[in-house]
Image (cartoon, rainbow, N blue to C red):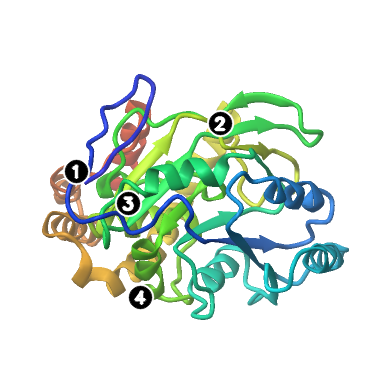
Amino acid sequence: MMTVAAKPPIAETTPSGPPAAIGTAARVAILLGTFNGERFLEEQLASIERQTHGNWCLFAADDGSRDGTWAILERFRRALPEGRVSLRLGPGRGFAANFLGLVCAPDIEAEAFAYCDQDDIWEADKLARALAWLTTVPAGVPALYASRSRLVDASGRAFGLSPLPSRPPGFANALAQNIASGNTMVFNRAARSLLMQAGAEAPVPAHDWWTYIAVTGCGGMVHVDPMPTLRYRQHGGNAIGHDVSWSARLRRLRNAWLGSLRRMNDGNLAALACLRDRLTDDNRRTLDHLEAMRSSVGLTRLLHLRSSGLHRQTKLGDLSLWVLAATGRL
């Protein structure tokens, strides 16, 4: 069961069943990962404080900053009521492990969870928009909200919008690419339980891509809001960034040709083994075909790829998928 808002809009299915798991007054745990973020962090924290949805708590994990990041976090913690902000040290193994450590921490309790990057600027209604959709999802169904982003430069000047998906979200797409930025993601307890089952040590390349895979694989719902809910700052220090230029695309294709995508898929598939019992029957068959394709040779590879249904959002992306599969790089 999945929904997506796109351009042109794809019709949404109104879920039926038991009452929604959360309400619009839900407590939201904001999961902030930081590393040498002093340049933009204060502006991001100020945007969190301006949220129209006031029932939030912030959990920040600093992954070994050597600048003033910790001091900024500590000032923010002291300025708010006790218990509103919690600070901890990250594992020191990069951004994905830092976020997984937060989302899998058993002492963090909430009804909804929001990933948060250190250098963005949230729109005031970011959490409110996410909760408005999450409240429509039946209890126990994993649900993931994401949105479009307004792209801004290091000075905060807007220069564009992130693209909307042209095809509905789903497991066969998630195995091939991530269509949602983690900094826009808000998800419910049922989705969080999937991530906790796989654990903080899941060897995935990116926490947001992994969240998309886990939710879709286990029959969850995904909604991509066409309204931008944050200003996504693009600068030289981005851990990932959102460069859609042809030079960036060619660079990613070159890296995939050199084996980076296959290594990333190794990690995602290893993590999926922990959730195999919770995958839907159709998605388990999709996974089986993907794994068979990766261990096959010749024409058999392409037959398994076709049977898997794996796809990307564009025809050019699909073409690159087939080329990478044919050459054993997927």
Is 104 located above or below residue 154 in the figure? below
Q: Is residue 133 above or below residue 318?
A: below
Q: CA distance from mark 2 to mark 4?
A: 34 Å
What residue is disc 3 on? 175
Dot in front, 2 or 4: 4
Question: Is 107 left or right of 92, judged from the image as shown?
Answer: left
Few, some or many residues within 10 Å of mark 4 (<14, 14–19, 20+): few
The residue carrying mark 1 is 309
Tell me which corner region of the image, top left, top right, bottom left or bottom right, holds residue 306. top left
Q: Position of residue 5 (x, y in %)?
A: 36, 31
**Image spot of residue 267 (x, y percent):** 41, 66
Q: What amino acid type is highlighted by mark number 1?
A: Gly
Kindly indicate the quadrant of the structure image that contains residue 71.
bottom right
Residue 197 — which label?
Answer: 4
Q: CA distance from mark 3 to mark 2?
A: 20 Å
Tell which circle, 3 or 4, labels the residue nearer the N-terminal end.
3
Tell me the element at label 3.
loop
Q: Residues within 10 Å of mark 2 (few under 14, many from 20)?
A: few
**For mark 1, does the 10 Å Cα neighbourhood hold few (<14), some (14 to 19), or many (20 or more) residues?**
some
Question: In the rendered structure, are the residues bearing label 3 and label 2 in contact, judged by CB atoms less than 8 Å apart?
Answer: no
State the residue in front, 61 or 97: 61
Residue 230 visible somewhere in the drawing: yes
The residue that disc 2 covers is 244
Sequence-wise, the earlier of marks 3 and 2 is 3
